Amino acid sequence: MDKTNTTYCQRCGHIMASDIIGGRERPVCPQCGYVIFKNPVPGVGVLVEMEGGVVLIKRGHHPKKDLWALPAGFIEADESIEEAAVRECKEETNLDIELVEMFHVDSFPTDPTPQSGIIIFYRARPVGGALQPGDDAAEAAVYRPDALPVNVAFRTHRAALARWAGLNGAVATFTAPKGETYPLAPDLLIRRSRSEDEASILRL
């Protein structure tokens, strides 16, 4: 047996086998029945609107080194989505922010990263701090909707920025894989309902 690829049950320590569970082959412990499910991890990103544009950071490390991205990262186990958004933005841009509304939800099941995930983007405004790169960011800058960089690192970020640019009367173009599409229409906005929405909601 190739022990380098041996997986042990995290519940009882027995060597894992495999079986079809829920229509997929998964690691299963033949002793206690524990099943390893590989689920996507949750992440968060922020579109900080300031000076007529949006804040982007240039990645200082791999993956996607030297490409532009929105301030983003994974959510810690002991924090809310909102707390994670504020923390990630502070770490990467030095800006203190106020979240305005949830803007875009996406997933990256086939993105070439070690872990698939779901990412939730917020619109935000700065309320303190001075823009400067931090954490793994090499640069931080503000880009207008009609002058976004073409080399944006991740498909999910390109999708969020394309929608944001569309809502601001611009068309974003990126250096991206041929045939890449952004599934949500640029005029679709995810936000809390307001009193003026009542009539439309009642018609549904």
Image (cartoon, rainbow, N blue to C red):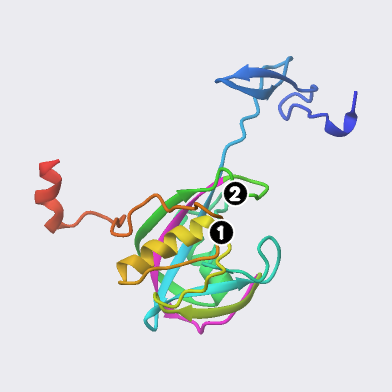
In the image: residue 26, left or right of residue 80: right
Pick the front one: 55 or 98 = 55
- The kind of residue on which mark 1 rests is Phe
Q: Mark yes or no: residue 129 visible.
A: yes
In magenta segment, residue 129: yes
Give coordinates of residue 181: x percent, y percent: 45, 52
Residue 36 x/y as whole percent: 65, 28
Q: Quadrant of the C terminus?
A: top left
The image's mark for residue 36 is none
Which secondary structure dominates the residues rendered in magenta?
A: strand
Question: Which secondary structure, mark 1?
Answer: loop
The boundaries of the magenta stretch are: 117-135
Residue pointed to by mark 2: 111
For badge 2, the amino acid type reads Asp
Q: Position of residue 30 (x, y in %)?
A: 73, 15
Q: Secondary structure at mark 2?
A: loop
Say which residue appears at 39% left-offset and 55% top-offset. Answer: 104
